[in-house]
Amino acid sequence: MSTVIAAIDNSAAARPVLVAASALAMVLGADVEAIHVTENEGQTARASAESLGIPFTKLTGEPARQIAGRATAGDVVAVAIGARRQLKQRHIGHLARKLANEIDKPVLVVPPEAEPVDRFRTVLIAMEGTPAKARSIKPAVDLAAGADLEVVVVHVDDEASIPSFSDQLAHETAAYADEFLARYLHGAPRARLEPRVGAPADEIVAACHSIKADVLALGWPQSTDERRGAVAREVLDHSPVPVLLVALADTPAS
């Protein structure tokens, strides 16, 4: 049986991570295992897992190393972790970023203010730039295609990349959407396209609110270079919902 690892701390933030991990596991047909890395007893973490009927494992050592090591196991298909933002910063915590950069499996980052649902019904898959970049969302589409999910792709253009339409705007916009879905999302029959124009990160976050997404999927560059994946980093810092980061094999600087 495949497993989604829920890496939790010893605080009230553990429960949202466990709930989100369970929702992801339902999509992937997997079980959930909670792990807590500590030198102490971890009573809150254990109680949170046990209240949801999730098996709990306590590990000792350096957290990133222990979590990443467990993630390499063949049965593990994804890892969920809390964002753990600093009080005076909007950036997610260093542990979540480190794991997202090192683990080659999807990483679900749960922001502290999120209210995860017990079942994912609507997934927002974000892409920006020209349709040539659509290859970056294929792993996320593949994950969602086999599940009974509403898939919404928000495709953000800036003024330089927006398609040129004639006076038949409504007709040509619909034709563009149909062509995009047929070419890039043929494996997800319930998918629809939501084209937007503007600053990519702002539009993606706004779309999370407007469509009431349960989870947001993003391609992640797995690089410590802040110039790479700038849009994904900004969205991750501001998303109101759990963010599923799917590793990109090769991402050009943005």
Image (tube, grey):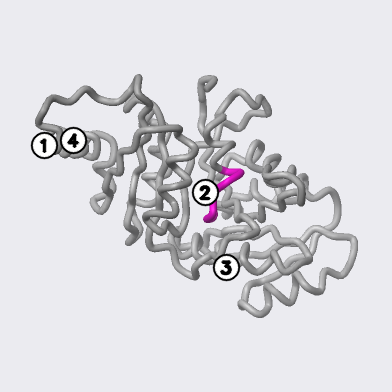
Q: Secondary structure at mark 3?
A: helix
How far apart are the alpha carbons under marks 1 and 4? 6 Å
How far apart are the alpha carbons under marks 2 and 3? 14 Å
* Marks 1 and 2 close (CB-CB < 8 Å): no
* Marks 1 and 4 close (CB-CB < 8 Å): yes
What residue is disc 4 on?
173
- Magenta-highlighted residues: 236-242
Q: Secondary structure at mark 1?
A: helix
35 is within the stretch colored magenta: no
Q: Nearer the viewer, mark 4 or mark 3?
A: 4
What residue is disc 3 on?
19
Disc nearer the start of the sequence (4/3) = 3
Q: Amino acid at mark 3?
A: Val
How far apart are the alpha carbons under marks 1 and 3? 42 Å
Q: Residues within 10 Å of mark 3 (few under 14, many from 20)?
A: many
What residue is disc 1 on?
171
Q: Amino acid at mark 4?
A: Thr
Q: Secondary structure at mark 2?
A: strand
Question: Which residue shows up at 30% across the image and 38% down it?
Answer: 195
Q: Which mark is residue 244?
A: 2
How far apart are the alpha carbons under marks 1 and 2? 33 Å
